[in-house]
Amino acid sequence: MQWPPLLDDISIKSETIDFYHFLADNFLAQHVDFCTRNDAILDLVISDEPNFVSDMMDLPPLQGSDHNVLAYKLEVRTKQKLSTRRIFDYAKADTEAIKSELNAVQIGILSWEACLPKTVRECSETSSKHWSTS
């Protein structure tokens, strides 16, 4: 068998041609172009990058198998991003000094009205006068 199939070869099965068109229509590449079991290509390596696979070769079958072993390289490029964030070692923190500082801070209890802007408080007061049931 030949890959890609010769589309004008009448001995090629229609399923093979359909599979070839499916791959082409979906921008996929089938990288195995030699027989992997007798005279058939049964083992496939498919990707969406034509240059993703290189140095494809077949090796003898493993003991007890009638399929050849495929060996190939994947061409993968990665970009390493250097991190510039600071990572603190909290195990070295002076927790007693932190507790002391926090205890020195005066925190008052606030009502919810004190947290709202003046316009919202005025609106709330006005609407409560209109909707009051008393």
Image (cartoon, helix red, strand yellow):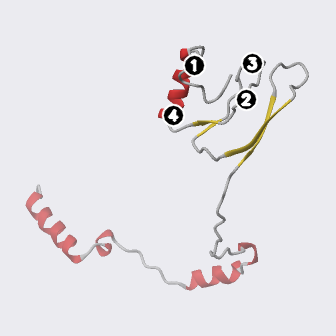
> What is the x, y in percent for residue 57?
79, 37
Side of 28 where 42 appears, left or right: right
Quarter of the figure with residue 111: bottom left
Q: Which residue corresponds to mark 4?
A: 24
Label disc, if present, on residue 9 of the rendered structure? 1
Of labels 4 and 2, earlier in sequence is 4
Side of 76 where 16 appears, left or right: left
Q: Circles 4 and 1: CB distance less than 8 Å?
A: no
Q: Nearer the viewer, residue 55 or 62?
A: 55
Q: Residue at x 13, y 63 (%)?
A: 127
Circle 2: residue type: Phe
Residue density around tag 3, few if under 14, some if 14–19, many if 20 or more, within 10 Å: few
Of labels 1 and 2, earlier in sequence is 1
Label disc, if present, on residue 39 of the rendered structure? 3
Q: Circles 4 and 2: CB distance less than 8 Å?
A: no
Q: Residue at x 64, y 79 (%)?
A: 99
Residue density around tag 4, few if under 14, some if 14–19, many if 20 or more, within 10 Å: few
Q: Circles 1 and 2: CB distance less than 8 Å?
A: no
Q: Circles 2 and 3: CB distance less than 8 Å?
A: no
Q: Secondary structure at mark 4?
A: helix
Q: Which residue corresponds to mark 2?
A: 34
